Amino acid sequence: MENQTILDGLDPEVLDRMGTRRDALRKAGGLGLGLALASVPLGLAALAKGAFAQGIPANVVSVLNFALVLEELEAEFYTLGAAAPGLIPASDRTLFVTIRDHERAHVEFLRDALGSQAVAKPTFDFTAGGAFSPFTDYAQFRALAQAFEDTGVRAYKGQAGNLLVAPAILRAALTIHSVEARHASEVRRLNGNFTEQAPQKGWITLRNRGALPAATQPVYDGEENLVQAGIDISTLPGASGTLSAEAASESFDEPLTRAEVEAIVDPFIVDPAA
Amino acid sequence: MSESNRPEESRGQSPTALERPRGRRDFLKWTGASAAAVFVAACDDTEVRTITEVTPPDTVIVNPPDPEYAAVTLNFSNNFGVLNYAYALEQLEAAFYTQVVASSSFSTTFSEPVRRVLVDLRDHEIAHREFLRRAIQALGGTPIPGLTPNFTSIDFASRDSVLTTARTFEDLGVAAYNGAGPLLSNDDAGRTLLTVAGKIVSVEARHAAAIRDILSPRTSAFAPASFDDALPPGQVLNAAAPFIRNRITATNVPSIG
Protein backbone atom coordinates (compact mmCIF):
# COMPACT_ATOMS: atom_id res chain seq x y z
CA MET A 1 0.00 0.00 0.00
CA GLU A 2 2.90 2.25 0.66
CA ASN A 3 3.57 2.54 -3.02
CA GLN A 4 -0.03 3.04 -4.02
CA THR A 5 0.09 6.69 -5.00
CA ILE A 6 -1.61 9.15 -7.23
CA LEU A 7 0.42 7.92 -10.13
CA ASP A 8 -0.38 4.25 -9.78
CA GLY A 9 -3.37 2.19 -10.68
CA LEU A 10 -4.68 3.90 -13.76
CA ASP A 11 -8.35 3.49 -14.33
CA PRO A 12 -9.32 4.77 -17.78
CA GLU A 13 -12.97 4.09 -17.15
CA VAL A 14 -13.01 6.44 -14.20
CA LEU A 15 -11.00 8.94 -16.18
CA ASP A 16 -13.62 8.88 -18.92
CA ARG A 17 -16.27 9.85 -16.45
CA MET A 18 -14.36 12.87 -15.29
CA GLY A 19 -15.81 15.11 -17.95
CA THR A 20 -14.54 18.62 -18.27
CA ARG A 21 -11.57 20.08 -16.53
CA ARG A 22 -13.76 22.33 -14.45
CA ASP A 23 -15.84 19.36 -13.41
CA ALA A 24 -12.63 17.65 -12.48
CA LEU A 25 -11.72 20.60 -10.32
CA ARG A 26 -15.03 20.48 -8.55
CA LYS A 27 -14.71 16.77 -7.99
CA ALA A 28 -11.24 17.22 -6.65
CA GLY A 29 -12.76 19.74 -4.27
CA GLY A 30 -15.37 17.24 -3.27
CA LEU A 31 -12.63 14.87 -2.33
CA GLY A 32 -11.48 17.39 0.20
CA LEU A 33 -8.63 18.85 -1.76
CA GLY A 34 -7.23 21.42 0.56
CA LEU A 35 -7.11 25.13 0.13
CA ALA A 36 -4.91 26.12 2.96
CA LEU A 37 -1.20 25.77 3.02
CA ALA A 38 -1.10 23.13 5.70
CA SER A 39 -3.53 20.94 3.87
CA VAL A 40 -1.79 20.86 0.53
CA PRO A 41 0.05 17.62 1.17
CA LEU A 42 -3.11 16.14 2.66
CA GLY A 43 -4.98 17.47 -0.32
CA LEU A 44 -2.86 15.64 -2.78
CA ALA A 45 -2.95 12.60 -0.56
CA ALA A 46 -6.73 12.73 -0.74
CA LEU A 47 -6.42 13.15 -4.46
CA ALA A 48 -4.28 10.05 -4.53
CA LYS A 49 -7.25 8.00 -3.56
CA GLY A 50 -9.55 9.79 -5.96
CA ALA A 51 -10.59 9.31 -9.51
CA PHE A 52 -8.97 12.48 -10.75
CA ALA A 53 -5.57 11.24 -9.75
CA GLN A 54 -5.79 8.31 -12.10
CA GLY A 55 -4.02 8.54 -15.37
CA ILE A 56 -1.54 11.30 -14.78
CA PRO A 57 0.56 11.68 -17.91
CA ALA A 58 4.16 10.55 -17.90
CA ASN A 59 5.17 14.12 -18.64
CA VAL A 60 3.78 15.24 -15.29
CA VAL A 61 5.68 12.46 -13.51
CA SER A 62 8.79 13.68 -15.24
CA VAL A 63 8.20 17.27 -14.15
CA LEU A 64 7.62 16.21 -10.54
CA ASN A 65 10.83 14.19 -10.56
CA PHE A 66 12.69 17.18 -11.95
CA ALA A 67 11.31 19.24 -9.08
CA LEU A 68 12.20 16.49 -6.63
CA VAL A 69 15.87 16.56 -7.61
CA LEU A 70 15.98 20.34 -7.10
CA GLU A 71 14.30 20.05 -3.71
CA GLU A 72 16.67 17.26 -2.68
CA LEU A 73 19.57 19.48 -3.65
CA GLU A 74 18.26 22.39 -1.62
CA ALA A 75 17.28 20.26 1.38
CA GLU A 76 20.69 18.64 1.59
CA PHE A 77 22.47 21.94 1.07
CA TYR A 78 20.70 23.58 4.02
CA THR A 79 20.88 20.43 6.15
CA LEU A 80 24.65 20.27 5.74
CA GLY A 81 24.96 24.03 6.18
CA ALA A 82 22.93 24.08 9.38
CA ALA A 83 25.00 21.17 10.72
CA ALA A 84 28.37 22.72 9.87
CA PRO A 85 29.95 23.96 13.11
CA GLY A 86 30.39 27.70 13.26
CA LEU A 87 29.15 28.30 9.72
CA ILE A 88 25.89 30.17 10.23
CA PRO A 89 25.93 32.96 12.80
CA ALA A 90 23.21 32.93 15.43
CA SER A 91 21.57 36.01 13.91
CA ASP A 92 20.87 34.17 10.65
CA ARG A 93 20.18 30.72 11.97
CA THR A 94 16.39 30.99 12.14
CA LEU A 95 16.34 32.16 8.56
CA PHE A 96 18.25 29.19 7.18
CA VAL A 97 16.67 26.59 9.45
CA THR A 98 13.27 27.83 8.28
CA ILE A 99 14.28 27.38 4.67
CA ARG A 100 15.83 23.97 5.39
CA ASP A 101 12.61 22.74 6.96
CA HIS A 102 10.55 23.97 4.01
CA GLU A 103 12.79 22.22 1.49
CA ARG A 104 12.55 19.02 3.49
CA ALA A 105 8.77 19.31 3.47
CA HIS A 106 8.83 19.81 -0.30
CA VAL A 107 10.95 16.69 -0.72
CA GLU A 108 8.63 14.69 1.46
CA PHE A 109 5.58 15.94 -0.40
CA LEU A 110 6.99 15.15 -3.84
CA ARG A 111 8.19 11.71 -2.71
CA ASP A 112 4.77 10.93 -1.32
CA ALA A 113 3.11 12.10 -4.51
CA LEU A 114 5.42 10.12 -6.78
CA GLY A 115 5.63 6.99 -4.64
CA SER A 116 7.36 4.20 -6.52
CA GLN A 117 7.91 6.48 -9.49
CA ALA A 118 10.13 8.87 -7.56
CA VAL A 119 13.75 8.94 -8.62
CA ALA A 120 16.43 8.10 -6.07
CA LYS A 121 18.18 10.93 -4.34
CA PRO A 122 21.27 11.90 -6.30
CA THR A 123 24.69 12.24 -4.69
CA PHE A 124 25.57 15.91 -4.41
CA ASP A 125 28.89 17.69 -4.38
CA PHE A 126 28.38 21.23 -3.15
CA THR A 127 31.99 22.10 -3.89
CA ALA A 128 31.18 21.58 -7.59
CA GLY A 129 34.44 19.73 -8.07
CA GLY A 130 36.37 21.98 -5.72
CA ALA A 131 35.15 25.35 -7.01
CA PHE A 132 33.26 26.22 -3.81
CA SER A 133 33.61 25.56 -0.09
CA PRO A 134 30.14 26.58 1.14
CA PHE A 135 30.27 24.70 4.44
CA THR A 136 33.40 26.41 5.69
CA ASP A 137 32.90 29.79 4.02
CA TYR A 138 29.70 31.54 5.03
CA ALA A 139 29.81 34.07 2.19
CA GLN A 140 29.90 31.21 -0.28
CA PHE A 141 27.11 29.44 1.52
CA ARG A 142 24.96 32.54 1.29
CA ALA A 143 25.87 33.05 -2.35
CA LEU A 144 24.97 29.49 -3.32
CA ALA A 145 21.77 29.70 -1.29
CA GLN A 146 20.73 32.72 -3.32
CA ALA A 147 21.67 31.01 -6.59
CA PHE A 148 19.73 27.86 -5.68
CA GLU A 149 16.64 29.78 -4.59
CA ASP A 150 16.53 32.05 -7.61
CA THR A 151 17.07 28.99 -9.82
CA GLY A 152 14.30 27.12 -8.06
CA VAL A 153 11.84 29.93 -8.70
CA ARG A 154 12.73 29.96 -12.37
CA ALA A 155 12.59 26.18 -12.63
CA TYR A 156 9.05 25.81 -11.25
CA LYS A 157 7.88 28.71 -13.38
CA GLY A 158 9.25 27.03 -16.49
CA GLN A 159 7.27 23.86 -15.80
CA ALA A 160 3.92 25.35 -14.80
CA GLY A 161 2.51 25.08 -18.30
CA ASN A 162 3.23 21.35 -18.33
CA LEU A 163 1.06 20.90 -15.25
CA LEU A 164 -2.12 22.58 -16.54
CA VAL A 165 -3.37 19.12 -17.51
CA ALA A 166 -3.46 18.30 -13.80
CA PRO A 167 -4.88 21.39 -12.04
CA ALA A 168 -4.63 20.00 -8.53
CA ILE A 169 -0.97 19.15 -9.01
CA LEU A 170 -0.37 22.52 -10.63
CA ARG A 171 -1.91 24.21 -7.60
CA ALA A 172 0.39 22.32 -5.27
CA ALA A 173 3.40 23.20 -7.41
CA LEU A 174 2.42 26.87 -7.40
CA THR A 175 2.22 26.86 -3.61
CA ILE A 176 5.81 25.60 -3.55
CA HIS A 177 6.94 28.01 -6.27
CA SER A 178 5.89 31.07 -4.29
CA VAL A 179 7.56 29.77 -1.14
CA GLU A 180 10.82 29.41 -3.08
CA ALA A 181 10.36 33.04 -4.11
CA ARG A 182 9.96 34.04 -0.47
CA HIS A 183 13.19 32.21 0.33
CA ALA A 184 14.95 33.89 -2.57
CA SER A 185 13.80 37.32 -1.43
CA GLU A 186 15.01 36.74 2.09
CA VAL A 187 18.44 35.39 1.14
CA ARG A 188 18.93 38.13 -1.43
CA ARG A 189 18.12 40.81 1.14
CA LEU A 190 20.41 39.14 3.67
CA ASN A 191 23.18 39.19 1.08
CA GLY A 192 22.60 42.91 0.70
CA ASN A 193 22.69 43.39 4.48
CA PHE A 194 19.06 44.50 4.32
CA THR A 195 19.95 47.86 2.80
CA GLU A 196 17.44 47.14 0.03
CA GLN A 197 19.63 48.49 -2.73
CA ALA A 198 20.34 47.14 -6.19
CA PRO A 199 21.83 44.74 -7.00
CA GLN A 200 20.94 42.98 -3.76
CA LYS A 201 17.27 43.65 -3.38
CA GLY A 202 14.69 40.95 -2.75
CA TRP A 203 13.86 41.05 -6.47
CA ILE A 204 16.10 40.62 -9.48
CA THR A 205 17.23 43.76 -11.28
CA LEU A 206 17.92 43.14 -14.96
CA ARG A 207 20.38 40.23 -15.20
CA ASN A 208 22.45 41.46 -12.30
CA ARG A 209 23.99 38.70 -10.19
CA GLY A 210 25.20 41.18 -7.58
CA ALA A 211 28.04 39.92 -5.43
CA LEU A 212 27.69 36.35 -6.62
CA PRO A 213 30.58 34.64 -8.43
CA ALA A 214 30.65 34.77 -12.24
CA ALA A 215 29.87 31.07 -12.40
CA THR A 216 26.32 31.88 -11.28
CA GLN A 217 25.57 34.22 -14.18
CA PRO A 218 23.36 31.64 -15.97
CA VAL A 219 21.03 31.88 -12.97
CA TYR A 220 20.28 35.47 -13.99
CA ASP A 221 20.62 35.46 -17.76
CA GLY A 222 17.27 36.28 -19.31
CA GLU A 223 15.95 38.13 -16.25
CA GLU A 224 16.63 41.38 -18.10
CA ASN A 225 13.65 40.68 -20.35
CA LEU A 226 11.35 43.70 -20.56
CA VAL A 227 8.70 42.39 -22.96
CA GLN A 228 5.75 40.44 -21.56
CA ALA A 229 3.14 39.00 -23.94
CA GLY A 230 4.33 41.42 -26.59
CA ILE A 231 4.15 44.45 -24.30
CA ASP A 232 7.33 46.32 -23.43
CA ILE A 233 6.91 47.05 -19.74
CA SER A 234 9.50 49.83 -19.83
CA THR A 235 7.22 51.85 -22.13
CA LEU A 236 4.31 51.81 -19.67
CA PRO A 237 3.42 54.79 -17.51
CA GLY A 238 4.87 54.71 -14.02
CA ALA A 239 4.29 56.94 -11.02
CA SER A 240 6.01 59.70 -12.96
CA GLY A 241 7.11 59.24 -16.53
CA THR A 242 7.54 55.73 -17.89
CA LEU A 243 8.67 52.82 -15.78
CA SER A 244 12.41 52.34 -15.66
CA ALA A 245 13.99 49.29 -17.26
CA GLU A 246 15.12 48.28 -13.80
CA ALA A 247 11.59 48.37 -12.38
CA ALA A 248 10.21 46.72 -15.52
CA SER A 249 12.61 43.78 -15.16
CA GLU A 250 12.11 43.48 -11.41
CA SER A 251 8.33 43.31 -11.81
CA PHE A 252 8.45 40.02 -13.69
CA ASP A 253 10.51 36.95 -12.87
CA GLU A 254 11.54 34.88 -15.84
CA PRO A 255 11.34 31.11 -16.33
CA LEU A 256 14.18 28.78 -17.23
CA THR A 257 13.84 25.70 -19.37
CA ARG A 258 14.53 22.34 -17.83
CA ALA A 259 17.75 22.07 -19.82
CA GLU A 260 18.90 25.46 -18.59
CA VAL A 261 18.20 24.52 -14.99
CA GLU A 262 19.96 21.17 -15.37
CA ALA A 263 23.01 22.92 -16.78
CA ILE A 264 23.08 25.14 -13.68
CA VAL A 265 22.78 22.33 -11.13
CA ASP A 266 24.75 19.62 -12.95
CA PRO A 267 28.11 20.68 -11.44
CA PHE A 268 26.62 19.92 -8.00
CA ILE A 269 25.39 16.45 -8.93
CA VAL A 270 28.05 13.75 -9.08
CA ASP A 271 25.79 10.75 -9.24
CA PRO A 272 22.49 11.43 -10.92
CA ALA A 273 19.48 9.53 -9.77
CA ALA A 274 18.94 6.26 -11.52
CA MET B 1 -30.05 41.75 11.90
CA SER B 2 -31.18 38.67 13.77
CA GLU B 3 -32.90 37.38 10.68
CA SER B 4 -29.90 37.85 8.50
CA ASN B 5 -28.84 34.25 8.13
CA ARG B 6 -31.40 31.81 6.98
CA PRO B 7 -29.83 30.32 3.89
CA GLU B 8 -31.95 27.17 4.09
CA GLU B 9 -34.89 29.28 3.06
CA SER B 10 -33.26 30.38 -0.15
CA ARG B 11 -31.46 27.34 -1.39
CA GLY B 12 -32.57 26.23 -4.80
CA GLN B 13 -34.66 29.29 -5.48
CA SER B 14 -34.34 31.40 -8.55
CA PRO B 15 -32.69 34.76 -8.04
CA THR B 16 -35.91 36.64 -7.63
CA ALA B 17 -37.78 37.93 -4.67
CA LEU B 18 -39.19 35.23 -2.49
CA GLU B 19 -41.77 37.60 -1.15
CA ARG B 20 -42.93 40.79 -2.67
CA PRO B 21 -42.22 43.83 -0.57
CA ARG B 22 -45.37 45.35 0.87
CA GLY B 23 -44.31 47.78 3.48
CA ARG B 24 -43.12 51.22 2.59
CA ARG B 25 -39.76 50.36 4.00
CA ASP B 26 -38.68 46.82 3.61
CA PHE B 27 -36.28 44.60 5.27
CA LEU B 28 -33.74 43.77 2.63
CA LYS B 29 -31.36 41.00 2.95
CA TRP B 30 -28.96 39.13 0.79
CA THR B 31 -28.24 35.54 1.36
CA GLY B 32 -27.23 32.57 -0.68
CA ALA B 33 -24.40 30.14 -1.07
CA SER B 34 -21.91 32.95 -1.06
CA ALA B 35 -23.07 33.94 2.41
CA ALA B 36 -23.18 37.56 1.38
CA ALA B 37 -23.82 40.04 4.11
CA VAL B 38 -26.86 42.03 4.91
CA PHE B 39 -26.49 45.35 3.18
CA VAL B 40 -29.65 47.17 4.08
CA ALA B 41 -31.86 46.55 7.01
CA ALA B 42 -34.85 48.65 7.77
CA CYS B 43 -38.07 47.51 9.30
CA ASP B 44 -41.56 48.71 8.72
CA ASP B 45 -43.46 49.61 11.82
CA THR B 46 -46.04 46.95 11.37
CA GLU B 47 -44.65 44.21 9.24
CA VAL B 48 -41.40 42.76 8.08
CA ARG B 49 -41.05 41.49 4.58
CA THR B 50 -38.01 39.89 3.20
CA ILE B 51 -36.48 40.25 -0.20
CA THR B 52 -33.87 37.65 -0.75
CA GLU B 53 -31.41 37.76 -3.57
CA VAL B 54 -30.27 34.21 -4.05
CA THR B 55 -26.93 33.79 -5.62
CA PRO B 56 -26.10 30.53 -7.35
CA PRO B 57 -23.41 28.48 -5.64
CA ASP B 58 -20.81 29.53 -8.20
CA THR B 59 -21.50 33.26 -7.90
CA VAL B 60 -19.86 35.54 -5.37
CA ILE B 61 -20.97 39.10 -4.74
CA VAL B 62 -19.06 41.52 -2.59
CA ASN B 63 -19.95 45.05 -1.52
CA PRO B 64 -23.32 46.76 -1.73
CA PRO B 65 -24.45 48.36 -4.95
CA ASP B 66 -23.56 52.03 -5.11
CA PRO B 67 -24.41 54.14 -8.16
CA GLU B 68 -21.34 56.26 -7.51
CA TYR B 69 -19.01 53.38 -8.31
CA ALA B 70 -19.19 51.18 -11.38
CA ALA B 71 -20.38 47.67 -10.69
CA VAL B 72 -17.86 45.12 -11.88
CA THR B 73 -18.40 41.59 -13.13
CA LEU B 74 -15.73 38.92 -13.30
CA ASN B 75 -16.76 35.88 -15.31
CA PHE B 76 -14.47 33.00 -14.44
CA SER B 77 -15.75 30.80 -17.26
CA ASN B 78 -12.93 32.05 -19.45
CA ASN B 79 -9.37 33.34 -19.23
CA PHE B 80 -10.47 36.98 -19.32
CA GLY B 81 -12.25 36.53 -16.02
CA VAL B 82 -9.03 35.33 -14.46
CA LEU B 83 -7.05 38.17 -16.05
CA ASN B 84 -9.53 40.81 -14.91
CA TYR B 85 -9.47 39.31 -11.43
CA ALA B 86 -5.70 39.76 -11.39
CA TYR B 87 -6.15 43.25 -12.82
CA ALA B 88 -8.54 44.12 -9.99
CA LEU B 89 -6.07 43.02 -7.32
CA GLU B 90 -3.17 44.81 -8.98
CA GLN B 91 -5.25 47.99 -9.15
CA LEU B 92 -5.80 47.72 -5.43
CA GLU B 93 -2.13 47.15 -4.64
CA ALA B 94 -0.91 49.88 -6.99
CA ALA B 95 -3.34 52.40 -5.54
CA PHE B 96 -2.28 51.48 -2.04
CA TYR B 97 1.48 51.89 -2.56
CA THR B 98 0.95 55.02 -4.63
CA GLN B 99 -0.85 56.57 -1.68
CA VAL B 100 1.78 55.25 0.76
CA VAL B 101 4.63 56.85 -1.15
CA ALA B 102 2.69 60.06 -1.83
CA SER B 103 1.84 60.52 1.84
CA SER B 104 3.27 63.69 3.34
CA SER B 105 4.65 61.66 6.23
CA PHE B 106 6.33 59.03 4.07
CA SER B 107 9.87 60.19 4.77
CA THR B 108 9.32 60.53 8.50
CA THR B 109 7.34 57.32 8.95
CA PHE B 110 9.78 54.94 7.28
CA SER B 111 13.52 54.42 7.34
CA GLU B 112 15.40 54.89 4.11
CA PRO B 113 15.75 51.15 3.35
CA VAL B 114 12.05 50.59 3.94
CA ARG B 115 11.22 53.57 1.74
CA ARG B 116 13.24 51.95 -1.04
CA VAL B 117 11.20 48.79 -0.67
CA LEU B 118 7.89 50.65 -0.71
CA VAL B 119 8.85 52.69 -3.77
CA ASP B 120 9.87 49.50 -5.56
CA LEU B 121 6.62 47.83 -4.63
CA ARG B 122 4.68 50.81 -5.93
CA ASP B 123 6.51 50.65 -9.26
CA HIS B 124 6.11 46.88 -9.56
CA GLU B 125 2.39 46.96 -8.86
CA ILE B 126 1.90 49.80 -11.32
CA ALA B 127 3.79 47.71 -13.89
CA HIS B 128 1.49 44.75 -13.21
CA ARG B 129 -1.63 46.90 -13.39
CA GLU B 130 -0.68 48.66 -16.61
CA PHE B 131 0.49 45.43 -18.19
CA LEU B 132 -2.69 43.52 -17.36
CA ARG B 133 -4.99 46.20 -18.73
CA ARG B 134 -3.11 46.26 -22.02
CA ALA B 135 -2.78 42.49 -22.19
CA ILE B 136 -6.53 42.02 -21.76
CA GLN B 137 -7.15 44.53 -24.56
CA ALA B 138 -4.49 43.04 -26.81
CA LEU B 139 -6.03 39.59 -26.44
CA GLY B 140 -9.46 40.92 -27.42
CA GLY B 141 -10.98 41.16 -23.96
CA THR B 142 -12.51 44.07 -22.11
CA PRO B 143 -10.73 45.28 -19.00
CA ILE B 144 -12.91 46.01 -16.00
CA PRO B 145 -13.19 49.72 -15.18
CA GLY B 146 -10.88 51.39 -12.74
CA LEU B 147 -11.81 50.42 -9.19
CA THR B 148 -12.20 52.97 -6.44
CA PRO B 149 -10.19 51.98 -3.38
CA ASN B 150 -11.43 52.39 0.15
CA PHE B 151 -8.45 52.98 2.38
CA THR B 152 -10.30 54.64 5.24
CA SER B 153 -9.19 51.89 7.61
CA ILE B 154 -5.52 52.59 6.94
CA ASP B 155 -3.48 55.18 8.82
CA PHE B 156 -0.90 56.24 6.25
CA ALA B 157 1.10 58.01 8.95
CA SER B 158 1.47 54.78 10.89
CA ARG B 159 4.32 52.42 10.03
CA ASP B 160 2.47 49.49 11.52
CA SER B 161 -0.81 50.25 9.76
CA VAL B 162 0.86 50.58 6.37
CA LEU B 163 3.10 47.56 6.71
CA THR B 164 0.46 45.22 8.07
CA THR B 165 -1.85 46.27 5.25
CA ALA B 166 0.97 45.66 2.79
CA ARG B 167 1.45 42.21 4.29
CA THR B 168 -2.25 41.49 3.86
CA PHE B 169 -2.23 42.60 0.24
CA GLU B 170 0.93 40.73 -0.71
CA ASP B 171 -0.06 37.47 0.96
CA LEU B 172 -3.51 37.78 -0.57
CA GLY B 173 -2.01 38.41 -3.99
CA VAL B 174 0.16 35.32 -3.73
CA ALA B 175 -2.77 33.17 -2.62
CA ALA B 176 -4.98 34.62 -5.35
CA TYR B 177 -2.56 33.91 -8.18
CA ASN B 178 -1.82 30.46 -6.80
CA GLY B 179 -5.53 29.71 -6.73
CA ALA B 180 -6.27 31.23 -10.12
CA GLY B 181 -3.49 29.62 -12.14
CA PRO B 182 -5.21 26.23 -12.36
CA LEU B 183 -8.39 27.96 -13.60
CA LEU B 184 -6.73 28.98 -16.86
CA SER B 185 -7.59 26.95 -19.94
CA ASN B 186 -5.54 23.88 -20.70
CA ASP B 187 -4.43 25.04 -24.13
CA ASP B 188 -1.71 27.19 -25.64
CA ALA B 189 -3.39 30.43 -24.62
CA GLY B 190 -3.84 29.19 -21.06
CA ARG B 191 -0.24 27.99 -20.86
CA THR B 192 1.04 31.35 -22.07
CA LEU B 193 -1.07 33.22 -19.53
CA LEU B 194 -0.06 30.81 -16.77
CA THR B 195 3.58 31.55 -17.46
CA VAL B 196 2.92 35.28 -17.30
CA ALA B 197 0.93 34.88 -14.08
CA GLY B 198 3.82 32.83 -12.72
CA LYS B 199 6.21 35.67 -13.54
CA ILE B 200 4.06 38.01 -11.47
CA VAL B 201 3.22 35.77 -8.53
CA SER B 202 6.81 35.07 -7.60
CA VAL B 203 7.47 38.80 -7.50
CA GLU B 204 4.46 39.19 -5.21
CA ALA B 205 5.92 36.45 -3.01
CA ARG B 206 9.26 38.28 -2.92
CA HIS B 207 7.35 41.37 -1.80
CA ALA B 208 5.45 39.42 0.84
CA ALA B 209 8.64 38.01 2.29
CA ALA B 210 10.30 41.43 2.40
CA ILE B 211 7.37 43.14 4.09
CA ARG B 212 7.02 40.31 6.58
CA ASP B 213 10.71 40.42 7.39
CA ILE B 214 10.59 44.17 7.87
CA LEU B 215 7.76 43.64 10.35
CA SER B 216 9.56 40.77 12.11
CA PRO B 217 13.24 40.96 11.19
CA ARG B 218 15.14 37.70 10.76
CA THR B 219 12.47 35.47 12.14
CA SER B 220 10.64 32.74 10.26
CA ALA B 221 7.92 35.27 9.38
CA PHE B 222 9.13 35.83 5.80
CA ALA B 223 7.84 32.39 4.84
CA PRO B 224 5.33 31.25 7.43
CA ALA B 225 4.75 27.81 5.93
CA SER B 226 6.28 25.24 3.61
CA PHE B 227 3.37 25.70 1.22
CA ASP B 228 1.72 29.01 0.48
CA ASP B 229 -2.02 29.41 0.31
CA ALA B 230 -3.93 28.90 -2.92
CA LEU B 231 -7.27 30.57 -2.35
CA PRO B 232 -10.38 30.43 -4.51
CA PRO B 233 -11.60 33.75 -5.93
CA GLY B 234 -14.55 33.96 -3.56
CA GLN B 235 -12.36 33.96 -0.49
CA VAL B 236 -9.95 36.45 -2.01
CA LEU B 237 -12.69 38.84 -3.09
CA ASN B 238 -14.27 38.76 0.35
CA ALA B 239 -10.92 39.57 1.90
CA ALA B 240 -10.29 42.40 -0.55
CA ALA B 241 -13.82 43.82 -0.43
CA PRO B 242 -13.33 46.14 2.57
CA PHE B 243 -10.66 47.97 0.58
CA ILE B 244 -12.81 48.46 -2.52
CA ARG B 245 -15.86 50.69 -3.05
CA ASN B 246 -17.19 48.95 -6.13
CA ARG B 247 -19.60 46.11 -6.05
CA ILE B 248 -17.97 43.05 -7.60
CA THR B 249 -19.91 40.10 -8.92
CA ALA B 250 -17.90 37.02 -9.76
CA THR B 251 -19.68 34.37 -11.80
CA ASN B 252 -18.77 30.79 -12.62
CA VAL B 253 -16.46 30.72 -9.65
CA PRO B 254 -15.12 27.25 -8.91
CA SER B 255 -15.63 26.09 -5.35
CA ILE B 256 -11.91 25.62 -4.97
CA GLY B 257 -9.18 27.79 -6.30
Image (spheres, coloured by chain):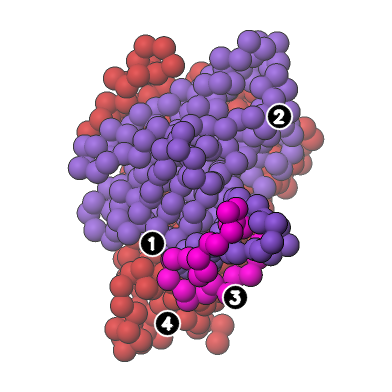
Chain colours: A red, B purple
Q: Dot 1: few (<14), some (14–19), or many (≥20) neighbours within 10 Å?
A: some
The subunit carrying tag 2 is B
Residue A49 in percent (x, y) is at 50, 82
Residue B113 in percent (x, y) is at 63, 17
Q: Secondary structure at mark 1?
A: loop
User: Based on the displayed image, in which of its 4 quarters is residue A169 positioned?
Assistant: bottom left
Q: Which residue is mark 1?
A: B252
State which mark lies toward you, 3 or 4: 3
Q: Which residue is pictured at 37% across the width and 44% down the height?
A: B84
Query: Marks 3 and 4: same chain?
Result: no
Residue A140 in percent (x, y) is at 59, 32
Q: Dot 4: few (<14), some (14–19), or many (≥20) neighbours within 10 Å?
A: many
Q: Which residues are magenta?
A: B4-29
Q: Amino acid at mark 1?
A: Asn
Cα distance, mark 4 to mark 2?
46 Å
State which mark lies toward you, 2 or 1: 1
